[in-house]
Image: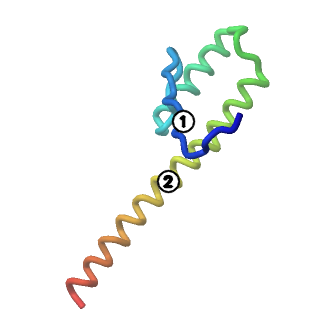
Amino acid sequence: MKTDITEEPAPKKKRPGVRTLSSPADVSRLLARLIKQRLADDSSIDNETLRAIVQACSVLLKSIEQGDTDKRLAEIESQLQQYEKEHV
C-alpha cells in the first residue's frame, strides 16, 4: 500500500504531563524538577538517564539561544536596510 507523500500528517495529540521545551525557562524548570527528584533519591530516574537529559538540554539551550540571536540579527539588518533606503 503506497502512501501519498503530499498528505499532511495527523495532528499530534497532547499528552498529559508532557511539556514543550521552547524557552530557556522551560528547560530550567525541567532540569530543576529532575535534579530535585534525584536529590530526593527518587528511583524513577537513574544517573545515566539524568546525565543524558542534561546533555540534551544543554544542546537544546544552545539551539534556542542561536535562534534568538538569528532573529535579533535579522531584525537589526532589516532596520539598517530601511535606514539606508531612507537616508541614502
Instruction: Relative to 39, say whether 29 is above or below.
Output: below
In this rendering, position of residue 23 left or right of residue 55: left
In this rendering, position of residue 71 left or right of residue 27: left
Residue picked out by circle 1: 9
Instruction: Relative to 37, say whether 30 is above or below.
Output: below
In this rendering, position of residue 61 left or right of residue 42: left
- Residue at 69% x, 38% y is 2
What separation in Å lies between label 1 and label 2 (alpha carbons)? 25 Å
Marks 1 and 2 close (CB-CB < 8 Å): no
Closer to the camera in the image, 67 or 6: 6
Q: How is the image coloured?
A: rainbow
Instruction: Relative to 8, say whether 11 is above or below.
Output: above
Q: Secondary structure at mark 1?
A: loop
Instruction: Relative to 72, say whether 37 is above or below.
Output: above
- Residue at 47% x, 60% y is 70
Quarter of image, res 49: top right
- Residue at 37% x, 72% y is 77
Taking the view exactly as shown, the residue that stands out farthest to the front is: 1
The residue mark sitting in front, 1 or 2, is 1
Q: Quadrant of the C terminus?
A: bottom left
* Neighbourhood count class around disc 1 (C-alpha, 10 Å): few under 14, some 14–19, many 20 upward: few
The amino acid at mark 1 is: Pro
Sequence-wise, the earlier of marks 1 and 2 is 1
* Neighbourhood count class around disc 2 (C-alpha, 10 Å): few under 14, some 14–19, many 20 upward: few
Quarter of image, res 1: top right
Residue picked out by circle 2: 67
The amino acid at mark 2 is: Gly
